[in-house]
Image (tube, helix red, strand yellow):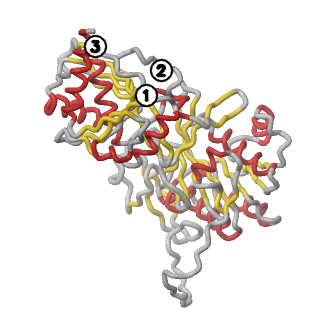
Amino acid sequence: MARRPSSYVCQSCGAVSAKWAGRCESCGEWNSIVEEQTGGGIGGGPGRAARSKGRVIPLVGLTGDAKEAARIRTEVPELDRVTGGGFVRGSALLVGGDPGIGKSTLLIQAAAQLASLGHKTVYISGEEAVGQVRLRAERLGLAEAPVSLAAETSVEDILATLESDTAPALLILDSVQTLWTDKVESPPGTVTQVRASAQAMVRYAKKNGTTMVLVGHVTKDGQIAGPRVVEHMVDAVLYFEGDGAHQYRILRSVKNRFGATDEIGVFEMTGKGLVEVPNPSALFLGDRNSSAPGAAVFAGLEGSRPLLIEIQALVAQSSLGTPRRAVIGWDSARLSMILAVLEARCGVRFSQHDVYLNVAGGLKINEPGADLAVAAALISSLSGLALPANCVYFGEVSLSGAIRPVAQAQSRLKEAEKLGFDQAYCPEGNLKDSTSSFRTTGLAELGDFVAKLSVEAGTSGES
């Protein structure tokens, strides 16, 4: 009997090699390469059977009737915001997050909401028994919602069940790593099984106009586990972020074919499930101590949503040969750059000080516009001078020390005005976006900002 062909697949990144090796050349992981059969079927290699002649497909121009994608609103405003206005019929979404962060809680709440609106909803769990899901629904007060529930991991059984009745409007599969298909001779959870199972379920969703949500585990690096091709198959990838020490959760869109990327929704974890936070700026500034030095309010932007976030800095004398640099919620390389610019361009020395930086509320920000707020917090902590309580900061700092304009400055200022702020430091290029009710100071160089703070420090010291 002829031996079936096989290949060696990395279980971390999905790279395929012709022979086994102790270390994957693509991602560098050790002992992650496993031998898998490459027989035909879903996700398998190209078959050896003769291929039939393809059909001719029509080619059309760019002009024509283009209709907006049909959506199903969940009536959960924060979830609808992240998805771009609701679930698109026939789309596939992948939701990832750390264990216990609240992925299943959020999805069972969305499923119950849609079911109560009259949409057929199916929730299939591969990790929990039906009784466990019912207990969660009862704890959340959703036991009466008409959600169809099952516990199954076989793709063939799931498809046979779904095809025996009318197609649901929403299908939730928790999680994609537990699915397996007998058309692939690999253990459940392997790269080949995850890819093949996801491909089969996405094909069903596209064919029947069902919105499908796949739940995915994350690796220690925070990336969704399994092959990257799964993220390419789906229409949207959402990350559910949060810190166990905080009750706030952030649903962030990193890919969306039907809406804006980097959009966020803010939730608060309570005893009765996830509750939406309609005004996250007030939430992130709720416990602010405006009289303490080292705190600056950043007028930021997450997707299309303006947010006011407190940046906290602590600069302390160091007893070490190499001072500490600790960052929570921001890019550590970006902090090193700001410190270098302050030393080289502004003459502010941090070489003998430990520097600690924190973004309040457990939020993670990646926007370069936070550079000016970080610099303000660092200088405030070093000098021991508290910044004005009614002032916000935003602007990108370049290596030359210049402060560059940022996008949508008017939205940032309107959000600040809504919460009682009336003063702002921003780039000179954004002065045209300021309103009459705001006392806006435009800055061209970071050195100008340091000089203004020095003058204020001297004035407050004399008084």
Local packing at callout 1 (Cα closer than 10 Å; few below 14, some 14-19, many 20+) is: many
**Image quarter of the N terminus:** bottom right
Q: Distance between the residues labelled 3 and 2?
A: 22 Å
Q: Distance between the residues labelled 2 and 1?
A: 8 Å
Labels 2 and 1 touching (C-beta < 8 A): yes
Q: Name the residue under label 3.
A: 460
The residue sitting at 62% across, 32% down in the picture is: 268
Instruction: Place residue 314 in its image quadrant.
Output: top left
Identity, as a three-letter code, of the amino acid under mark 2 = Arg
Res 328 seen here: yes
The residue sitting at 76% across, 60% down in the picture is: 168
**Image quarter of the C terminus:** top left
Residue 299, position in %: x, y? Answer: 42, 36
| Mark sitting on residue 310 | 1
Disc nearer the start of the sequence (1/3): 1
| Mark sitting on residue 288 | 2
Picture layout, residue 375 above or below residue 415: above
Q: What element carries label 1?
A: strand
The residue mark sitting in front, 1 or 3, is: 3
Picture layout, residue 201 above or below residue 127: below
Identity, as a three-letter code, of the amino acid under mark 3 = Ser
Residue 222, position in %: x, y? Answer: 46, 41
- In the rendered structure, the answer to whether residue 267 lies left or right of residue 262 reads right
Residue 327, position in %: x, y? Answer: 35, 28
Q: Distance between the residues labelled 1 and 3?
A: 23 Å
The residue sitting at 74% across, 50% down in the picture is: 123
The residue sitting at 51% across, 43% down in the picture is: 218
Q: Is mark 2 on a helix, strand or loop?
A: loop
Residue most extreme to the right: 144
Picture layout, residue 390 above or below residue 130: above
